[in-house]
Image (tube, rainbow, N blue to C red):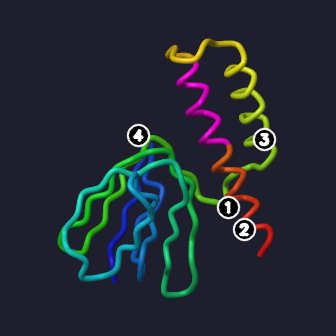
């Protein structure tokens, strides 16, 4: 079993053991299993899937870094939310705001890049909520 910790700037989002962890790597999706070689990798906006002994737990992540050493996986991220805590209504409002800001600011500006990042994050959260409600 892997020991897993998911940490944001303000909170420890998850701490426990998992059979495997699927991560959205910058160069593609990856799955980490027990006895995996040590690794440090950059994560992109996407979905983390923890396969637990008694089921699975899903999280939305917005950029981060994963480090695996000695059977312990630590995920540091800008923002991570458990699927069960995401409000679809709030995510849809965030998407609408991001789209409005993209229209307002010129491409290449800091504000435009921030709006683009916000849009990706909102769309990822919406995708995750829809994934768990269609099961």
> Would you say the residues marked 1 and 4 are in contact, meaning their CB atoms lie under 8 Å apart?
no
Task: Choose the circle earlier in sequence order: 1 or 2.
Answer: 1
CB within 8 Å, label 1 to label 2:
yes
**In x, y percent, where is residue 79?**
50, 44
- Of helix, strand and loop, which one carries label 4? loop
Say whether disc 3 or disc 4 marks the residue closer to the N-terminus: 4
Q: Residue at x 72, y 51 (%)?
A: 126
* Image point (50%, 45%), residue name: 62
User: Would you call the spot at circle 4 few (<14 residues within 10 Å), some (14-19), or many (20 or more)?
Assistant: few
Q: Which residue is mark 2?
A: 132
Q: CA distance from mark 2 to mark 4?
A: 26 Å
In this picture, which residue range is highlighted in magenta?
112-122
The x and y percentages for residue 114 are: 55, 25
Q: Quadrant of the N terminus?
A: bottom left
Q: Disc 3 to disc 4, how far (Cα)?
A: 24 Å
Closer to the camera in the image, 85 or 101: 101
Disc ID at residue 9: 4
Q: Which mark is in front, 1 or 2?
A: 2
Outermost residue toward the bottom in this view: 53
Q: Are marks 3 and 4 in contact (CB under 8 Å)?
A: no
Nearer-N-terminus badge (3/2): 3
Choose the circle earlier in sequence order: 1 or 4: 4
Q: Nearer the viewer, mark 3 or mark 1?
A: 3
Residue 5 x %, y %: 37, 62
The answer to whether mark 3 and mark 1 are in CB contact below 8 A is no
| Position above or below: 32 against 6 | below
Q: Is residue 88 above or below residue 38?
A: above
Viewer-side residue, 121 vs 19: 121
- Residue bearing mark 1: 84
Label 1: which secondary element: helix
Which label belongs to residue 92?
A: 3
């Amino acid at each position: 079993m892997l020991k897993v910790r998911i940490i944001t700037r303000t909170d420890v989002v998850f701490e426990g053991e998992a059979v495997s962890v699927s991560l959205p790597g910058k160069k593609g999706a990856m799955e980490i299993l027990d006895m995996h070689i040590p690794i440090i990798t950059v994560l992109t906006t996407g979905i983390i899937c923890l396969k637990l002994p008694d089921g699975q737990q899903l999280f939305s992540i917005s950029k981060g870094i994963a480090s695996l050493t000695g059977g312990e996986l630590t995920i540091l991220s800008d923002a991570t939310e458990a699927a069960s805590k995401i409000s679809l209504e709030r995510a849809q409002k965030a998407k609408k705001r991001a789209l409005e800001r993209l229209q307002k600011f010129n491409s290449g500006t800091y504000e435009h890049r921030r709006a683009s990042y916000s849009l990706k994050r909102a769309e990822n959260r919406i995708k995750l909520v829809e994934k768990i409600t269609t099961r």
